[in-house]
Amino acid sequence: MNFTIEIEQEQDGRFLAEVINFPGVLAYGQTREEAIARVKALALRVLADKLEHGEIRT
């Protein structure tokens, strides 16, 4: 499974990363790399939860 991540820098300097097609999966970071790492971790947690609850077929 591939994720597409969009990143933008807020006016306060923080970075916002969002996984496209995964509603609500977004994370802030002080750096671009931190935001990406956080959103990847969140996406994996959401994916694991969906698998545990039978929402995704493997």
Image (spheres, helix red, strand yellow):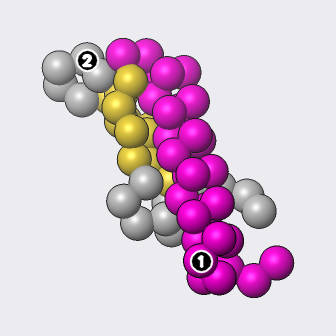
Q: Residue at x 39, y 47 (%)?
A: 26
**Magenta stretch: dominant secondary structure:** helix
Query: Taking 17 as reference, is 53 left or right?
Result: right
Q: Is residue 46 magenta?
A: yes
Q: Residue at x 57, y 51 (%)?
A: 45
* Mark closest to the chain's N terminus, 1 or 2: 2
Query: Taking 38 as reference, is 58 left or right?
Result: right
Above or below — where is 49 with respect to 38? below
Q: Quadrant of residue 50?
A: bottom right
Question: As shown in the figure, which amino acid type bears the numbered disc 1?
Answer: His
From this viewpoint, is residue 6 visible? Answer: no
| Nearer the camera: disc 1 or disc 2 | 1
Q: Position of residue 38 (x, y in %)?
A: 50, 33
Q: Residue at x 36, y 59 (%)?
A: 24
For the residues labelled 1 and 2, the Cα–Cα distance comes to 37 Å
Q: Is residue 40 magenta?
A: yes
Looking at the image, which is closer to me, 45 or 32? 45
Q: Secondary structure at mark 2?
A: loop
Quarter of the image with the C terminus in it: bottom right
Q: Name the disc covering residue 13, or none.
A: 2
Looking at the image, which is closer to me, 23 or 12? 23
Q: Which residue is mark 1?
A: 53
